[in-house]
Amino acid sequence: MKNSAKIVLGIATLWPIVYMCLFFVFMFSMFLWIPQQSSSGGPPVFITALFGLHFFTMLLIFGLIAVYIVNVFRNDRIDNDKKALWAVVIFLGNCIAMPVYWYLYIWKE
């Protein structure tokens, strides 16, 4: 894998963690500055944008899970008895396990 592809995969892997932090900051800040109800009747623009970003992040996580699980079984640097363990760890603890796997087995390749 080229270095540029590794960096793009690393950024995509870190995005869910960054997004989660931004999401919590945004939600807590909404409690501090509750906007006045608008007369337009529709949802505010920032809620619509947040929904789109949230949906994108969920799709990205599903795609990353697939990419990493395929990489686990194609990677010769991982022992055969650890491949199933890595697949389960990536599937269940994806946002925490994927950056660790990326650093150990993709970046240090």
Image (cartoon, rainbow, N blue to C red):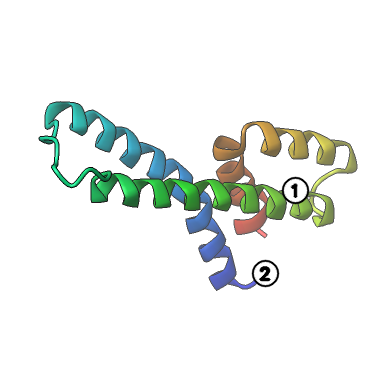
**Secondary element at image label 1:** helix
> Taking 95 as reference, is 4 above or below it?
below
- Residue at 19% across, 32% down: 29
Q: Nearer the viewer, residue 78 or 59?
A: 59
User: Can you tell which of label 2 and label 1 is closer to the viewer?
Assistant: 1
Question: Mark 2 or mark 1: which comes first in sequence?
Answer: 2
Specify whether 51 is left or right of 91: left
- Would residue 17 be seen by someone viewing this image from the given angle? yes
Q: Nearer the viewer, residue 16 or 83?
A: 16
- Residue at 64% across, 45% down: 101
Q: Which disc number belongs to residue 85?
A: none
- Residue at 26% across, 48% down: 46
> Taking 16 as reference, is 11 above or below it?
below
Neighbours of disc 1 within 10 Å: few (<14), some (14-19), many (20+): many
- Would residue 14 be seen by someone viewing this image from the given angle? no
The three-letter code of the residue at mark 1 reads Ile
- Residue at 75% across, 55% down: 71
Q: Position of residue 34 (x, y in %)?
A: 14, 31
Residue under numbered circle 1: 69
Separation of marks 2 and 1 at Cα, in angstroms: 16 Å
Q: Position of residue 21 (x, y in %)?
A: 35, 37
> How many numbered marks, from 0 up?
2
Specify whether 22 is left or right of 61: left
Residue under numbered circle 2: 1
The three-letter code of the residue at mark 2 reads Met
